[in-house]
Image (tube, helix red, strand yellow):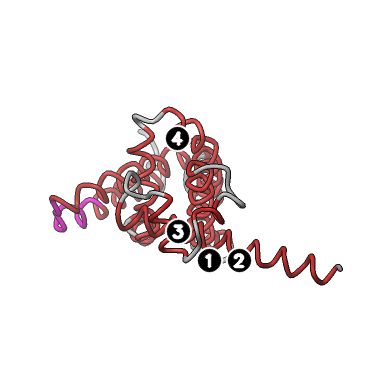
Amino acid sequence: MTNARRTQAERSAATIAKLVEATIEAIEQVGYHSTSLGEISSRAGVSKAAIFRHFDSRMDLVVAAAGEVSRRHLAVVAELRIPGSVAHPVDLAALMHLMRNQIRSDINTVWLELLVAARTEPELRLRIAPVLRELYDELDELAVSVLTPDVSSEAARLLATSLIHMFDGEAILRTTYPRPELEDARIDHVAAAFRALTGPTVPGP
């Protein structure tokens, strides 16, 4: 009986994983509003009836997908917490390139789609707010662990949030109006400003 229960639990987990993955792919490829239960079931190879054995609503499935996207983001950046993985003073340009590449990834397109949709959908906004808050809290703490003692904890959090906002906007705009020269120059200028901020203090007169 125990083995039977374990097998059923494994099957259920596998179906949930397929549904979440199909939801992520659908939102990334056809957009949030076109990600219907029919679209999800077709991509997952699971009937609509089977979806409701695991999720009460489309919204629950979308929120589960948002949580998985958050986990994948954190898995990528978690390596920066490994001791010795970041030299001091920090090479901010290298970190910015890593951050920009992750924000331009297909998986982050899902976040951008959800954030735009949440502007006009109160339920979606309410449901994904805790997921987004947890993600930003983790990124804030990561920034503190990586950037201090080069800058204060407050400055590290401010810098991380500012860079995320900058690269999110860039990721949206570059689809319609790419400006690669400006985008690359932006990283160089921000990194130069960071070096000036964290360089040796010049004694006063």
- Furthest residue toward right: 1
Secondary structure found at label 4: helix
Residue type at numbered disc 1 = Ser
Residue 172 horizontal/vertical position (percent): 25, 47
Q: Which residue is mark 3?
A: 41
If you read the primary sequence from the N terminus, does the residue marked by circle 2 or circle 4 appear first?
2
Main SS of residues in magenta: helix
Between the residue at mark 4 and the residue at mark 1, the CA separation in whole angstroms equals: 37 Å
Between the residue at mark 2 and the residue at mark 1, the CA separation in whole angstroms equals: 34 Å
Q: Residue at x 21, y 57 (%)?
A: 184
Q: Which residue is mark 4?
A: 124
Where does the C terminus fall, quadrant-wise? top left
Secondary structure found at label 1: loop
Nearer the observer: mark 2 or 4; the answer is 2
Residue type at numbered disc 4 = Leu
Residue 62 horizontal/vertical position (percent): 47, 46
Q: Residue at x 47, y 40 (%)?
A: 157
Secondary structure found at label 2: helix
Closer-to-camera residue (5/182)? 5
If you read the primary sequence from the N terminus, does the residue marked by circle 1 or circle 3 appear first?
3
The span picked out in magenta is 177-186
> Is 182 contained in the magenta span?
yes
| Mark 1 crowdedness (10 Å alpha carbons): few <14, some 14-19, many ≥20 | few
Residue 12 horizontal/vertical position (percent): 65, 61
Residue type at numbered disc 2 = Ala
Q: Which residue is mark 1?
A: 85
Mark 2 and mark 4 residues within 8 Å of each other at the beta carbon = no
| Mark 2 crowdedness (10 Å alpha carbons): few <14, some 14-19, many ≥20 | few
